[in-house]
Amino acid sequence: MISTHGSRMTSAHYARMGEAECRRIHLATLEVLERVGVDVHDEKAREILAGGGARVDGLRVRIPEYRVEASLRQAPRRMTLYDREGRVAMRAHEYNTYYGGGSDCLHVLDHRTGERREPTVADVTDAARVMDALPELDFVMSLFLPKDVNQQIYDRYQMEVMLNNTTKPIVYVTPDFEGCQAAVEMCEVVCGGAEAFQRKPFAACYINVTSGLVANEEALQKCMFLAEKGLPMMYIPLNAGGVNSPSTTAGCMATMNAGILLGIVLSQLINPGTPVAVPGWNGGPYNLKTMVGNYVLADEQGVPTTMGKYYELPVFGLGGSTDSKLLDMQCGFETTVSLMTALLHGANIVHDVGFMDSGLQGSLQLLVMANEFIGFLRAATRGVVVNEETLALDMVEELGPTGDYLQHPHTMRHVREPFYSDLMHKGVYAQWEKQGQKSMEQLAAEKVDQILETHNTEPLAEDVQKTISDIVARELNWINRKSDG
């Protein structure tokens, strides 16, 4: 984790918009919510919003300004996630930035063969273990959608795998409301009960919402369920500028923001103080040349994150991704720039590290390479400590212009502080040649294998493992009965 803004040790930072632009988008959002409204596809959600002062006309819900402002005051400024052992692992607020993988890629770029293939549960397991081992990744997601299990409940298998193969915080995604319930149930088993999980949550749900102006039933059900339990969530409506919203960045963001604020209102009406993270990507023009949902586009960079900073809410960002299909120059550029913009804008929980091909392909090699990029970026933007020890004036006076600084105790004390990459070769050509002339991609593949051969997570208690497995089996029986009925 690194904080990119500070008063005592200020480091690199950037804001895509100023206070005036954010304020104007906010006012436009309030106008959209009051005059146009959002289609809310759940009766219970409409009733709760109506009870809070909203006007309901069929599916359409219009929310007054006073209700939005009141809910923004109630929403927490931070989201604290713990590890599996109950230790604080992520304080997602202000400009603290944490990185992790993504979920549900339909293909694997196999690090051993270089082939693109469909993933299995074993790939989900490998991804969780790699993310657990990499020091610059702070949380875990499933990365792949396994094809060797029932596709209606694949997320239950993903959750079981993650719980068994990482101690880091987990961000989970479920295709249906029942999956969200099952995921929470599994987490409560690990924690020893619902109250224990609510007190120290180590997992948060990423809720996909149709768009800024359309709230789908499953997303609303998850939001209400999690709010009732006081559990953290990422409530993420996303717009495609020029497709379901204005193509201009400001218009796209204002309408997307309407759906975001509806989620804030709904959650706080149910349980004031429920932690909700808002999106840190999209909010800009879609790629109308290809009509493909790209993950790294220039115009949207930092816009929704800046709005999240305006509201002082936790931001669920995106970085470490590429739309390239290969581990090539485009991949390196887009992965790095998306990590950098998320960091400089202050996105708090940055997911989708290791994503390729517009989110359709995942790569364990790219996870390992991105881990190096993150280490470099954190070092490059870290605040500089200036004190008596770091100025080292006594050392300079002692050694003068020609002294041996290399062997001095001061150098020995600080020699391990700079960032040194395991994958970026910094020696001369002869050294690189002697070491096998390996590319970064080759070294990353070797590191993936090394992790998979040597890294193991402390296992859950056997009775906990069995209970989680029983929940997955129960869900399989339920979906089979539902399909037969």
Image (cartoon, grey):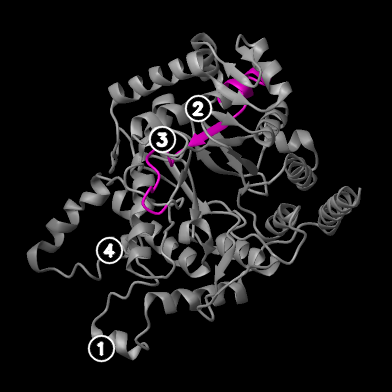
What is the spatial separation of the Cα atoms under label 2 and label 4, in whole angstroms? 41 Å
> As displayed, is residue 232 above or below residue 355?
above
Q: Earlier in the sequence, mark 2 or mark 1?
A: 2
Is residue 312 in view from this perspective?
A: no
What mark, if any, has residue 411 been given in the picture? Answer: 4
> As displayed, is residue 399 above or below residue 159?
below
Mark closer to the observer (1, 3): 3
Mark closer to the observer (3, 4): 3
In the image, what residue occupies the spot 43% across and 51% down?
291
What is the spatial separation of the Cα atoms under label 2 and label 3, in whole angstroms? 16 Å
Q: Earlier in the sequence, mark 3 or mark 4?
A: 3
Residue under pointer 2: 77
* Magenta run includes residue 277: yes
- The image shows residue 459 at horizontal and vertical percentages of 74, 61
What mark, if any, has residue 430 been given in the picture? Answer: 1
Start-end of magenta stretch: 264-290
What mark, if any, has residue 304 been given in the picture? Answer: 3
Q: Nearer the viewer, residue 141 or 247?
A: 247
* Magenta run includes residue 426: no
- The image shows residue 440 at horizontal and vertical percentages of 38, 75
What is the spatial separation of the Cα atoms under label 2 and label 1, in whole angstroms? 53 Å
In screen coordinates, is 94 left or right of 88? left
Q: Residues within 10 Å of mark 4 (few under 14, many from 20)?
A: few
**Amino acid type, residue under disc 2 in the picture:** Arg
Q: Earlier in the sequence, mark 2 or mark 3?
A: 2
What is the spatial separation of the Cα atoms under label 4 and label 1, in whole angstroms? 28 Å
Q: Nearer the viewer, residue 343 or 255?
A: 255
